[in-house]
């Protein structure tokens, strides 16, 4: 049976891919990125990888697509090339030979899965690549894996630098030791680095196998002053990230949130100067909200959100006018737009009050990004900087675009909500990093027609908003992607056919390195994809080793 792409989880990059939850209740659970999850069970495959593709040891489940599997004959090997070629659909292809060179990076794994055999069976636990003491967990294993990735022609790797690890114990007590060791390995292999300044919590969303909280001293402040966090309408605090309301408030041990972010970035720039000077660090992505994305934490799984719920507004209303108060008819995390008076067709979202509130709400988000990126440019002068937007594609085919509105993107059908964001990013010379480039609207319709999703329409709206102001655009995949069909979709978006200006992505980051990717047939497809992104004739290449 083929499981539709849209029912498998996103990965959102920075916090990983997949686990807690979407059943066929048509509700999505979010991550570092932004999508949904299958109703298939999780297990351990032969490589010890925890993934939605492994429902147990030696089940003959063959990965054939972007998160799709086929239950094959038990006599057929899980990794058999014949089985894969037999089920892989033939798709028409463009010839990308001689097209623009688009660099390809691979997100390093968020964790290493460790196994323990006991009397009660197999148990597993996860360790971050960099542990909570900022030590590199498995340098030999990482070196081996990165050599294999380099054999496929990748340009470099992406890694999160977690605030909750580096400045864990006390204000301005930074520990970069494990990251510096990792960066040396990358340099020795002649690869490049995309580094993410991750000012958010990892944990509590789908795909979060590792829990990395905010720094302990921040948590201690939050225990006595919970207003440092976002609060939903039921009064629940969200510790994923700090609220924009304290950007300029000295509530963090005599520092504002902006000063805390700047001091962290400046420390990284000084401590890792050799990697900037060597050109190893090619880009800094600056975290601007939950999962590192410029958005409100409007769809937290830990507060009950499931796909394709519209989410809830998250705004601190103290000191603002009555019209700046969140509407009381906006539904709940799991509502559909037709169930909420504010979002339904002809609803209050397009009233005088609705337009005022939504403009104010989105302006707070854009102003937050503006302030943080101003400081990032000071800290990383002369270095490419990127900011990530989430691909909130569900309810895109409705008038209100409710899920985008609660996330802070004022993008109803009669307004371009991404143009103001692109203008702000352009002001700072920042690259826009966007997700869900591999997704097809038809797949979403087949899996969750009630979500009225349109990822392809959303991708092109964002691309046009950015390219209209000559803003560089990078991207990453939202779902696990292993097959030619998914890669072809990425290529089509990365290098639009017959574009009169020859526009293309500035870079693509693959999420993420895993044991599934390293299976022979999957890795060969990935290597072919990399060559086509580089504009090179794909040819068969030898794999040094697979896992």
Image (cartoon, rainbow, N blue to C red):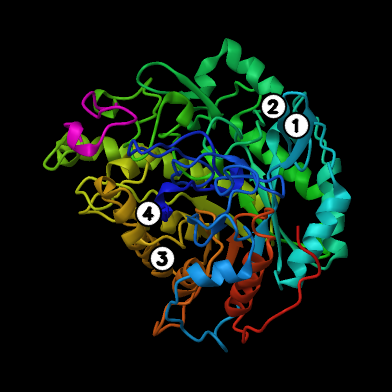
* Other residues around mark 2 within 10 Å, as few (<14) / some (14–19) / many (≥20): many
Q: Nearer the viewer, mark 1 or mark 4?
A: 1
* Other residues around mark 4 within 10 Å, as few (<14) / some (14–19) / many (≥20): some
Vertical position of residue 494 compared to residue 230: above or below: below
Sequence-earlier tag: 1 or 2: 1
Instruction: Indicate which disc residue 501 carries.
Output: none
Secondary structure, magenta segment, majority class: loop
Pointer 4: what residue? 420
Q: Quadrant of residue 339?
A: top left
The Cα–Cα distance between marks 1 and 4, rounded to whole angstroms, is: 33 Å
Q: Nearer the viewer, mark 3 or mark 4?
A: 3
List x then y, in percent, for residue 73. 53, 58
Pointer 1: what residue? 167
Would residue 45 appear left or right of 281 to someone viewing this image?
left
Along the line of sight, the residue nearer the viewer: 351 or 514: 514
Pick the quarter of the image with the N terminus.
Answer: bottom left
């Amino acid at each position: 049976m083929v499981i539709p792409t849209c029912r498998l989880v996103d990965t959102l990059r920075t916090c990983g891919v997949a686990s807690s939850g979407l059943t066929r209740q048509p509700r999505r659970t979010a991550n570092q990125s932004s999508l949904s999850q299958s109703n298939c069970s999780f297990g351990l495959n032969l490589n010890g990888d925890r993934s939605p593709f492994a429902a147990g040891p030696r089940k003959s489940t063959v990965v054939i697509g972007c998160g799709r599997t086929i239950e094959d004959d038990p006599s057929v090997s899980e990794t058999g090339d014949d089985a894969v070629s037999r089920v892989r659909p033939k798709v028409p292809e463009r010839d990308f030979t001689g097209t623009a060179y688009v660099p390809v990076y691979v997100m390093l794994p968020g964790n290493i899965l460790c196994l323990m055999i006991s009397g009660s069976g197999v148990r597993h636990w996860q360790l971050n690549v960099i542990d909570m003491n900022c030590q590199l967990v498995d340098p030999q294993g990482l070196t081996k894996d990165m050599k294999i990735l380099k054999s496929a022609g990748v340009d470099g790797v992406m890694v999160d630098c977690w605030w909750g690890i580096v400045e864990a114990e006390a204000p301005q007590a930074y520990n970069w030791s494990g990251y510096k060791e990792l960066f040396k390995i990358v340099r020795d292999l002649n690869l490049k680095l995309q580094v993410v300044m991750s000012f958010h919590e990892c944990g509590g969303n789908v795909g979060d196998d590792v829990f990395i909280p905010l720094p302990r001293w921040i948590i201690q402040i939050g225990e006595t002053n919970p207003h440092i966090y976002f609060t939903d309408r039921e009064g629940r605090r969200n510790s994923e990230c700090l609220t924009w309301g304290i950007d300029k408030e000295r509530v963090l041990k005599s520092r504002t949130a902006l000063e805390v972010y700047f001091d962290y970035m400046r420390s990284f720039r000084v401590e890792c100067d050799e990697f900037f000077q060597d050109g190893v660090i090619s880009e800094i992505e600056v975290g601007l909200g939950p999962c590192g994305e410029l958005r409100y934490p409007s769809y937290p799984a830990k507060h009950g959100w499931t796909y394709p719920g519209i989410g809830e507004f998250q705004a601190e209303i103290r000191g603002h006018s009555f019209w700046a108060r969140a509407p009381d008819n906006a539904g709940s995390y799991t509502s559909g737009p037709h169930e909420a008076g504010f979002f339904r067709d002809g609803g209050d979202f397009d009233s005088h009050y609705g337009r005022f509130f939504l403009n104010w709400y989105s302006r707070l988000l854009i102003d937050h990004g503006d302030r943080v990126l101003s400081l990032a440019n000071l800290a990383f002068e002369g270095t490419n900087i990127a900011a990530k937007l989430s691909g909130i594609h569900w309810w895109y085919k409705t008038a209100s675009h409710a899920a985008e509105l609660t996330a802070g993107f004022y993008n109803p059908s009669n307004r371009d909500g991404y143009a103001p964001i692109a203008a702000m990013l352009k002001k700072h010379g920042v690259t826009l990093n966007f997700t869900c480039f591999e997704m097809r609207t038809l797949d979403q319709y087949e899996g969750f027609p009630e979500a009225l999703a349109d990822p392809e329409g959303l991708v092109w709206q964002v691309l046009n908003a950015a390219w209209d102001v000559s803003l560089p655009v990078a991207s990453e995949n939202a779902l696990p992607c292993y097959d030619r069909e998914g890669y072809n979709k990425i290529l089509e978006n990365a290098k639009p056919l017959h574009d009169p200006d020859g526009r293309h992505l500035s870079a693509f980051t693959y999420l993420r390195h895993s044991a599934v990717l390293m299976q022979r047939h999957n890795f060969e497809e990935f290597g072919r994809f990399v060559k086509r992104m580089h504009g090179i004739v794909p040819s068969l290449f030898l794999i040094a080793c697979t896992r």
